[in-house]
Amino acid sequence: MFAQILQQLPQQLLNGLVLGSTYALFALGFTLMFGVLGVINLTYGFYFTTGAFLALYGTKLLALPIWLALPAAAIVTGGIAILFDAALLTPLRRKKAPELASLMVTLGATLLLYSLMTATFGTEIRRLPPGVISHAAIIVGAVRINWSQILIMVTTVVIVAALLALIRGTRFGLSMRALAENGEAAQLMGVNTDAVVRLVSLLSGALGATAGVLIGLNFNAIQPYMGESMMLKGFAVIIIGGLGDIKGALIAGLVIGVLEVLTAGFISSNYKDAVGFILLVTTLWFRPVGLFGRAPIKRA
């Protein structure tokens, strides 16, 4: 029994890293939106679904290769995110409405959007066209890896590196950090906060869409409510990692993915979804700000 577990462990760890990469990628946009704009935007799960459907029809109707359909879906979804932010959240931002207002507005918008998508596309699972990506496996020792898994991990690494470079090494990144720290002070110092908000919305929507495309590609299953279940994972990841912390979201996503796969592989798939909840509750008990979060400074 123990020898069998050791034999299967490398493959399960790889599968966990692949799943965790998609969780991390999804949570990065959610974290960016919360960390910079200070809102919990529940339409984010809809961006996940939208990206997957755009890639689906891009490869089916337009016969686009996946390397072109994926960035196209991300960019279009980012544009949709900008429009939704302008329509739903910008009026609240200008009136300095409480955070609960943005939560309720985006909740209502999400319910409407999912209903419209279900009425349009139905609830059945849709498949990407055959041959959109090679299913040939590369065997390295006891580990089998296919091209969709390679694409997921490489995309995650590239996006995380690019996002960190943008935030830490560019003028826009400095403006984003200034807005996250104090929006009014940033505006007084000459930061174009409206442009930064649009950029953050674009990046967040694109990240959510990219995660949706990769999940759809990995499991070859796309349906309107796929973003709803992913939002629960996203909440767990950003809370465990620390609200607004990109590094925390990345690490928490990978940890949850690996533990879920190990639980399903060696215990039972019935307990797989409980892993994130247990980690979430444990984190809130012992470190409410998350593994990498910082407690807010209270001033008299």
Image: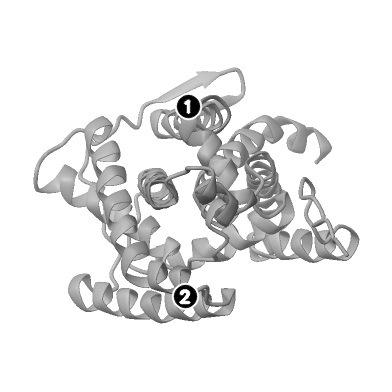
The residue under the point 32% across, 49% down is 78
**Residue under pointer 1:** 158
Q: Secondary structure at mark 1?
A: helix
The residue under the point 56% across, 31% down is 164
Give whichever of discs 1 and 2 has the lower sequence position. 2
Mark 2, Cα crowd under 10 Å, few <14 / some 14-19 / many 20+, is: few
Q: Which mark is residue 197?
A: none
Amino acid type for the residue under numbered disc 1: Val
* Residue 23 visible, this orientation: no
Place of residue 89 in the rendered image (x, y in percent of width and height, measured from the top left): 41, 69
Q: Against 223, is 215 above or below?
A: above
Pick the front one: 52 or 249: 249
Mark 1, Cα crowd under 10 Å, few <14 / some 14-19 / many 20+, is: few
Question: Of the residues tagged 1 and 2, which is closer to the observer?
Answer: 2
Place of residue 86 in the rendered image (x, y in percent of width and height, measured from the top left): 33, 64
**Residue under pointer 2:** 95
Apparent side of residue 156 relative to residue 148 in the rendered image (left or right) = right
Scheme of image coloration: one colour
